[in-house]
Image: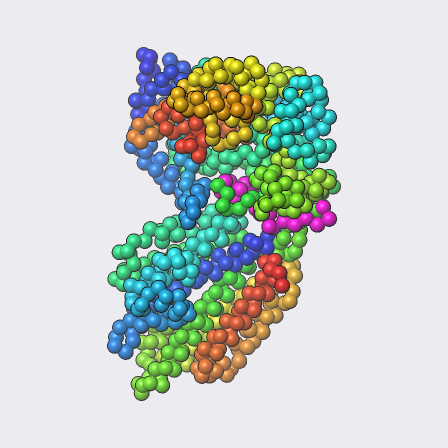
Amino acid sequence: MNSLLARFAENTFWLARYMERAENLARILDVTKTFVRDRTGGQDWLAVVEINADETPFFERYETASARHIINFYIADRDNPTSIISSVRAARENARSLRHLISTEMWSHLNRFYNALNRLSRSDLTVANLSNLCERIKLGCQAHVGITEGTLYRDQVWCFYHIGKYLERADQISRFIDTKYQHLKRVEASEDSPVDAGQWSAVLRSVAGYQAFRRTHPRGMRGEDVLRFLLHDPDFSRSIVFCMTQIHQSLRDLKQRFKLRQDPDADKEAKDILDSLRDRTLVGQVLDAPHAFADDFQRRLIGLSDRLGHSYFGWLK
Amino acid sequence: MPAGLSLRGSLAGYRPGPFYCEMLGFGDSVPAHTADIVKRLGKVSIPQLRRRARDAEAELFNLGITFTVYSQANSTDRILPFDVIPRVLSPSDWQTLEAGIRQRVAALNLLLADVYGKQRILKDKIIPPELVLGNENYRPQMKGVKVANGTYVHVCGIDLVRDEKGEFRVLEDNARTPSGVSYVVENRHLMLRSFPDLMEGVGVRPVSDYGMHLQRALREVAPGGSRDPNVVLLSPGFYNSAYFEHVFLAREMGVPLVEGRDLVVDNDRVYMKTTGGLERVHVIYRRINDDFLDPMAFRKDSLLGVPGLMQAYVKGKVTLANAVGTGVADDKAIYSYMPRVIRYFLGEDPIIANVETHICGEREGLAYTLDNLDKLVIKPVGEAGGYGIVIGPKATRAELEECRAKIKADPANYISQPVISLSVSPTLIGDKVEPRHVDLRPFAVTGSDTWVLPGGLTRVALPRGSLVVNSSQGGGSKDTWILE
């Protein structure tokens, strides 16, 4: 028998999403610390708050976007649902309900990882230690992905994991594009000097795309090319097109290999999103109105999640 | 320690005292079946033992082999403390125990079939009818319900203790949803990983196939006509302290771990909600109590259950394991009648004796109990987990008087037993090996016939002198070895 409870499909989906979210946040914090400077040479921590659209909850708790506040809010704050510890905790709670479906190694690693985060002290949460800490968090998330790849049985569970992971990744990249290119517009409007290449390399580094971009674009680094890379590159595992292709493939597997009914057709929805991304004028549109693009894209992802919920997770319409 | 018994290494300072010792017997010479392990423990130093014990406990924690204690804001994962020195039983002792357990399970099933059937045992006045019919665990809904193979108690845990003469006795039957079997299997895995040298070449009977046996038994009791029955494990969810065990068993059996909200009943058939829609369920190994199974039949406030489940069950469209209403048979009051029940249904003497028990609901039992309160163990009939037990010789005068008043107010709610000097087993406590009292809970699985897991859960009372082995009261566990 190979049927899967609707609840477990949903929990698998969320397990993957939360772990992907934790990794993305660690990347953004690390890169912000290392590469992102504002005009006075200070680190632009506010950008992190903007990417996550956390202005309201953040400023309810803290007066300034100082390094210490940001690190605490995004790594160790249990009351912030978007913090890394909250994400890993939520991933672990989902995994707890899935323990009989996932490998012991997956559970055991997640358990250790969460226990380690739980033990972080004030001295771990300083700017000086931030790179080191982000490195450890990234490694923890990557170990999770590796163990999952190496031990999870490739049945429906795998498909829902895969969809969750790439949906979250696509969502994160779109937020990232939103803030970065809005920032670009603001800078361009206020100053004569163009945004320097250092900004773009920081953008690429935070999505682990710097070297891949360099290989495909050996000369120069223009904001427009970086954007095209983030949106369209078919082989870059964090481009939006790549993510949507993966989601589309898994949805087709659910329908064709596992003979699951999709009503209404979720895979067609994913295909429609993909088609709209392949529009050649898209780069220009995003440069003009990054927020409108991100908004629309995120709305479509939510629509896709709803279809998943209704098709597979037993949500009522 | 008598001359001729020289203990070395980690056992060097060990003295079992006036109790039967699982490792050293009566203490005059090392029993043949433990000679090898005593020798091996003699080659390990206490610091080595300590180090490995620490690694083993860290592993339990990392593997999440924990039970969860929830407080208002937090959840804490605790491990069941694991003692690294195994409890070893000889093949001949086990042969007797196994036969005794099969006999007991057979009697429990016949008793349940009778009290929910013709009630001959009540009409013949072997058991006072009011003790059964007035029991809060008696389920009138079960009257006349046919269960597959006549099996009510598919999984039975029988708590055994060993007295100062080395004789095993039944302390308690657990016929509802006995837990602890996951620790038996995990303790063995832990032992194999941490102490390969201790186990190397010792023929210990395996325990890791428990899930396969359980799955087979559950398929055997599926409703008639289902050729490839779907089995599920019904759990209250991860707030339940035994959730790890539910995960463990679902994984070992390869069956879905469901909660009430994953199931629906339609036209008296039970279905689970899957990604492909509704799918029929034939057998439910349920780890929730009768009360919470079905808000339409039992507690109306139950959010854990499945509305309509009981009717589907009564109509024979789904099998519940254990059956509904088994609690009437493992009640502490019924326990005292079990030797008579065995004779009545099987025409045999009990292979494993009961602990001598005085029933306060009977006149002589009450008088004896009240006259000897300070020498007896007094147990409320309806409590589980070691709660409410008063140990006469250790109680203060005030505690005894409080107990006396409670018994007088509600005699039928109490039984009393002599204090049994439970056997001890060498146990690593800090940096010493000391005697600690143990019991044994073997597990019997019954579909069309009964299989007994070789060994069982040895629980150990960790506080010095304590006789209470329950995990909620400072108990730990040991690996239990049945030698080939």
Residue B30 place in picture, x, y as percent? 39, 17
Location of residue A68 (image quadrant) = bottom left
B329 to the left or right of B384:
right
- For the point 36% across and 68% down, the residue is A59
Residue B87 place in picture, x, y as percent? 43, 26
Q: Nearer the viewer, residue B292 or B200?
A: B292
Location of residue B425 (image quadrant) = top left
Residue B314 place in picture, x, y as percent? 71, 39
- The extreme bottom residue here reads A192
Question: What colour scheme was applied to this rendering of the protein?
Answer: rainbow
| Magenta stretch encompasses residue B264 | yes
Q: Is residue A96 above or below residue B290?
A: below
Q: Quadrant of the N terminus of chain B?
A: top left
Q: Is residue A91 above or below residue A270?
A: above
Q: Nearer the viewer, residue A277 or B437?
A: B437
Residue B395 place in picture, x, y as percent? 40, 22
| Magenta stretch encompasses residue B365 | no
Q: Nearer the viewer, residue A152 or B358?
A: B358
Location of residue B324 (image quadrant) = top right
Residue A276 showing in the rendered view: yes
- For the point 68% across and 22% down, the residue is B122
Query: How many dots with numbers?
Result: 0
- For the point 31% across and 31% down, the residue is B430
Q: Which range is magenta?
A: B242-268
Q: Is residue B463 above or below residue B216?
A: above
- For the point 55% across and 57% down, the residue is A10
